[in-house]
Image: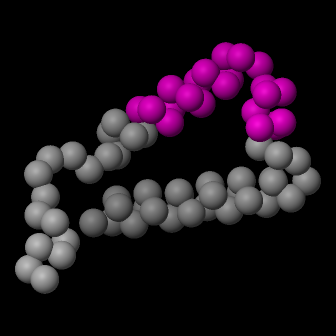
């Protein structure tokens, strides 16, 4: 439970940092100036985050009883 809260707070903080950075430059411009190994490390980090933090399995539809 606390882990979910920490992950949510970190995700919101990351989104706010991106939003702040976009005031001066587009993120596409910032990312394209990074060395290729930093970009690909970021891409792999995003993929791993989706795989490890994603919700998988069978869940009941939230509006099932309506």
Classify 46 as above or below 2: above
Magenta span contains residue 57: no
> Which quarter of the rendering shows the C terminus?
bottom left
Please state if 55 lies on the left or on the right of 46 as rendered. Answer: left
Classify 52 as above or below 13: above
> Which quarter of the rendering shows the N terminus?
bottom left
From the viewer's side, name the closer residue of 16 and 57: 57
What is the x, y in percent for residue 34? 78, 26
Q: Residue at x 58, y 24 (%)?
A: 41
Q: Residue at x 13, y 58 (%)?
A: 59
What is the x, y in percent for residue 22? 81, 54
| Count of numbered circles on the image | 0
Residue that protrudes farthest toward the bottom in the picture: 66
Q: Which residues are magenta?
A: 28-48
Magenta highlight: main SS = helix
Classify 33 as above or below 63: above
Q: Residue at x 76, y 33 (%)?
A: 31
What is the x, y in percent for residue 55? 26, 50
Please state if 29 lies on the left or on the right of 66 as rendered. Answer: right
The quadrant holding residue 7 is bottom left
Magenta span contains residue 44: yes
């Amino acid at each position: 439970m606390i882990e979910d809260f920490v992950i949510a707070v970190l995700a919101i903080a990351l989104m706010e940092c991106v939003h702040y950075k976009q005031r001066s430059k587009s993120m596409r411009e910032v990312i394209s100036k990074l060395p290729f190994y930093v970009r690909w490390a970021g891409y792999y980090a995003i993929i791993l985050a989706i795989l490890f933090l994603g919700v998988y399995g069978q869940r009941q539809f939230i509006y099932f009883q309506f």
